[in-house]
Image (tube, rainbow, N blue to C red):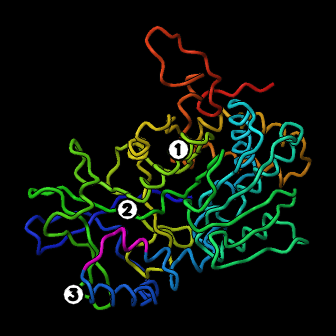
Amino acid sequence: MRVPVRCCAARVVIPCIWRGKYFSSGNEPAENNRVTPMLRHLMYKIKSTGPITVAEYMKEVLTNPAKGYYVHHDMLGEKGDFITSPEISQIFGELIGIWFISEWIAAGKSAAFQLVELGPGRGTLTGDILRVFSQLGSVLKNCDISIHLVEVSQKLSEIQALTLTEEKIPLERNAESLVYMKGVSKSGIPISWYRNLQDVPKGYSFYLAHEFFDVLPVHKFQKTPQGWREVFIDIDPQVSDKLRFVLAPCATPAEAFIQHDETRDHVEVCPDAGVIIQELSQRIALTGGAALIADYGHDGTKTDTFRGFCGHRLHDVLTAPGTADLTADVDFHYLRRMAEEKVASLGPIEQQTFLKNMGIDVRLKVLLDKSDDPSMRQQLLQGYDMLMNPKKMGERFNFFALLPHQRLHGGSHRMNAQQSRPSASPVAGFDELTWR
């Protein structure tokens, strides 16, 4: 779980001085201020071409092929830098699996569907979903299912393969192909790995993005008397081997992403998120299916959310780059706007509400009744508390969905005034699920 922190910065050579707190206390231990290979790379880059945007900084630090944090680290779990919901409780993934089956049934039980996960982590969430698919095999018996994982990290893709695939069936690898790895799940479902969503075959699909959008690069802007000014990262002239935040002296191209009626004095915009939402919207509008997005974020209200995590602790985002995760809260209002009404959107709603609507209390009781192991029972209760407690993940994480318009309207969304709107079945999670 990652925890929010406020952040700002200043540049005295700009007419408008941006005063405020830094991203962390500034009292970083000396050993954390080491010169990492990524810091050397960034300093060389800045010396060569000038200050870089926060978005470029995030992209380099997280996904640089040679030195990127995600490319070479297993950052999940107790030994990593953060723990995600699927790592906390099996119930989380099981309820997500139920959600996809519920939507598959509501949309008419297609003969086949693709399950596409963006940024699958260790594969734990997909594994829990596949277990639900197996347990409900009688419901899905005539449906042809395939799994498609979008993952840029070779290290994580290998961990995903260990989690999900049948050991007796060797993996197929082809680094030059759009499908760089193929395998078969323990239940016999084909799994394919891709580096980009655009490479996944188009077709009736359910898309899942859990803690994916929060690590996409953001541009940061501060409102000044001269107008919006983008935050850049530069070398600190006062301290060797250290980076600092500065404000651009004039307008920059990314300013086009800021709404004309924006009232906040500091905003973060994520063009990459907009591109992915548009791709998902076009696919869903064209071939059907749905997308479920779970992340911490806000509905266009927050300002400064850029932060780092290392060893389950907040970490100064400019210190020892390449050794910590970088993240920013998802702006769901922006995601909704990027869908451009091609599809319907639901949410965001808080995780505790979504999981309660999905029947987490019923599922917890079933598992507790089945278990005689005190340690297992304690683990289940602790996991439930972490997922549902408002002070932990319950209110910090949100769910957001993209669906075809006809899914909500019970038919085509282009109806004239004389037509009555057909009733549509509720969308699980966003409405209370009826358990039978």
| Mark 3 vs 2, N-terminal side | 2
Q: Is residue 1 magenta?
A: no
Residue occupied by mark 2: 218
Q: Residue furthest top?
A: 418
Q: Main secondary structure of the magenta part?
A: helix
| Structural crowding at the residue carrying mark 2, measured as other residues with C-alpha within 10 Å and reported as few (<14), some (14–19) or many (≥20) | many
Residue occupied by mark 3: 238
Of the residues tagged 1 and 2, which is closer to the observer?
2
Front residue of 52/278: it is 278
Question: For residue 398, which numbered disc appears in the image?
Answer: 1
Q: Is residue 286 above or below residue 82?
A: above
| Residue at 89% in and 52% down | 373
Region in magenta? 51-59
Indicate the quadrant where residue 361 lies: top right
Secondary structure of the residue carrying tag 1 is strand
Front residue of 335/240: it is 335
Indicate the quadrant where residue 436 lies: top right
Front residue of 384/280: it is 280
Q: Is residue 353 above or below residue 204?
A: above
| Residue at 11% in and 75% down | 13
| Residue at 9% in and 58% down | 226
